[in-house]
Amino acid sequence: MKMEIQMTKKVCALAIAGIFGGMMATAQAAPYVGTLDTRAAANVNNAVGEGAGTEPAAPSATGGDGLLQTFTGFDWHSNGAGFVQGYGFSGGGHAVGDTDSFTITTQFFAGSIGSSTTTPDLRVATPGPSVGTYEYTAIGQLLETATVTSVDGGGNVTGISIVTNAGGFFNIYFDISPDANPVAGTGFFDGTPIISGVFSGGLSSFSASGSIPTPGVIGVGGGTVFGVVTSVNNTYVNPTMVGTEVGTTLNFPGTTGAFTRPAFINGIATGVNTGSDFVLQTDAFQTFSIPEPGSIALIGLGLVGFGFMSRRNRKQG
């Protein structure tokens, strides 16, 4: 009888632990709204209504574009690039249902910032004006598993679905000596790190007129990936966010006139396209999230309940 009671206690404890784990796993996220501090940057007199020589030296309330309000995320410029490595679907002889794993290493510069504050001092690299006193850049790597969804008569892959696996990374930088160069592929990770994290999952798709990366073949795709924020520099970003969502668009070989193929991506020489390693044009919009206040309270109640049950079981034992 005593053993049965002890077993019942253990089952109850495990059940409560499972409920608590479920609360953690399903806690709802709320859209992030915060501030982004650009005041460490120098000033230029190109903001509407400013007179020459009226801005004080940075850091100040008007350094860069000041303290950006209602900051929600970054619109990464469409002249971003992704380097696919280890792709196994080039050439013919493939069938629907075949799978393959590969990596995509990316780099971006901000074309605009999600904020209610105007940002005339933001430098937007080529094909932007490349004028400004600060910039935001990002690098990352995604671990992908793809499944063939369509092939042509020769077994050339014309469609794939892509699952982003947990892992990889992303780093976002604030640079007050802006120098991102989409042609050379340099200047993307020499700023101050402000937000970092790892990817947790995602779904994408890609379709093409033939086998990628055969010359003359056109490919388009995109999807959404999710991540967990692991580090925030609160000197520049407040409050701390916990999650991120990135909407992506992919093009091969890239939109004429809007894409510059870089010589390097995250320090890796891209070389010429091969069947396994090639460059894509990548466009993305990244937002962030914080836990819903109600979810935090629910998790807190779960912790209290679990603690109470544990203490009660110890007393009865």
Image (spheres, rainbow, N blue to C red):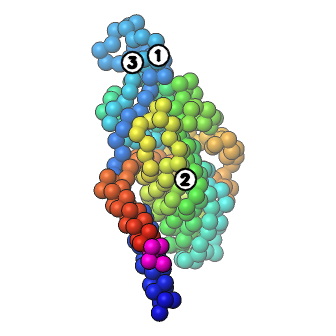
Q: Is residue 299 above or below residue 73?
A: below
Which residue is at the front of the view, 305 or 134? Answer: 305
Q: Are marks 2 and 1 in contact (CB under 8 Å)?
A: no
Q: Position of residue 109 (x, y in %)?
A: 51, 37
Check disc 1 and give the amino acid type. Ala
Q: Which mark is residue 58?
A: 1
Distance (Cα) linking label 2 and label 1 = 33 Å
Name the residue carrying label 3: 62
Is residue 300 rendered magenta in the image?
no
Query: Which residue is at the front of the view, 33 or 87?
Result: 33
Task: Name the N-terminal-most of marks 2 and 3.
Answer: 3
Q: Is residue 140 left or right of residue 312?
A: right
The answer to whether residue 86 is visible is yes
Tag 3 secondary structure:
loop
Q: Position of residue 228 (x, y in %)?
A: 49, 53
Mark positioned earlier in the residue sequence (2 or 1): 1
Look at mark 2 in the image and give the residue it sits on: 198
Find residue 87 and report its image quarter: bottom right
Could you say where residue 5 lies in the image, as x and y percent from the top left? 45, 86
